[in-house]
Image: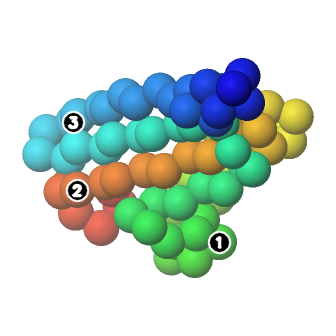
C-alpha cells in the first residue's frame, strides 16, 4: 500500500510571462522529461535544447532520475 501512495506524489506549478504560459508537472518516476509530449532530445534548434537541459544538468542524475517531468508550453512565440 505504501508503494502506491509514493507513486502518486506529484507537484504542479506554472509560470507566465506576457502571453506565454508554462505548466510543469513533476511526479515520481523513472527520469523522463517531455515538452508538449515530445522528448527533450527532439527540441529544435540545438541552442534551445541546451537551455532546456541546463536545470536538469544542475540537479544531476541522482535527483532527476527519480522524477518524471512534463512541461506544457503555450504562446509566446517560437522560443517558448
Secondary structure under tag 3 reads: strand
Q: Nearer the viewer, residue 61 or 52?
A: 61
Q: Nearer the viewer, residue 55 or 26?
A: 26
Q: Which of the marked residues, 3 or 1, is nearer the chain's N terminus?
A: 3
Task: Give SS at disc 2.
Answer: strand
44 sits to left or right of 68? left
Question: Label 3 belongs to which residue?
Answer: 17
Using the image, determine if residue 7 lies above or below residue 2: below
Q: Quadrant of the C terminus?
A: bottom left
SS under mark 1: helix
Mark 2 and mark 1 lie on one chain; the one further toward the N terminus is 1
Q: Label 2, on which residue?
A: 74
* C-alpha distance separating marks 3 and 1: 25 Å
Q: Residue at x 40, y 30 (%)?
A: 12
Give the residue at x 86% y 42%: 61
Work out whether residue 51 can be spotted.
Answer: no
User: Camera-side residue: 79 or 27?
Assistant: 27
**Is there CB contact under 8 Å for labels 2 and 1?**
no
Side (left or right) of 34 relative to 74: right
Q: What residue is rendered at 22% in x and 63% in y?
A: 77
Q: Nearer the viewer, mark 3 or mark 1?
A: 1
- Residue 32 is drawn in which quadrant? bottom right
Q: Residues within 10 Å of mark 1 (few under 14, many from 20)?
A: some
Q: Earlier in the sequence, mark 3 or mark 2?
A: 3
Residue at mark 1? 41
Residue 51 position within the rendered picture, expressed as x and y whole percent measured from the top left? 58, 52
At 20% across and 47% down in the image, what residue appears?
A: 20
Amino acid at each position: 500500500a505504501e508503494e502506491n501512495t509514493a507513486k502518486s506524489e506529484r507537484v504542479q506549478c506554472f509560470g507566465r510571462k506576457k502571453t506565454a504560459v508554462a505548466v510543469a508537472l513533476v511526479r515520481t518516476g523513472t527520469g523522463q522529461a517531455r515538452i508538449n509530449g515530445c522528448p527533450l532530445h527532439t527540441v529544435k534548434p540545438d541552442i534551445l535544447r541546451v537551455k532546456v537541459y541546463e536545470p536538469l544538468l544542475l540537479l544531476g542524475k541522482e535527483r532527476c532520475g527519480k522524477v518524471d517531468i512534463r512541461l506544457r508550453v503555450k504562446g509566446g512565440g517560437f522560443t517558448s
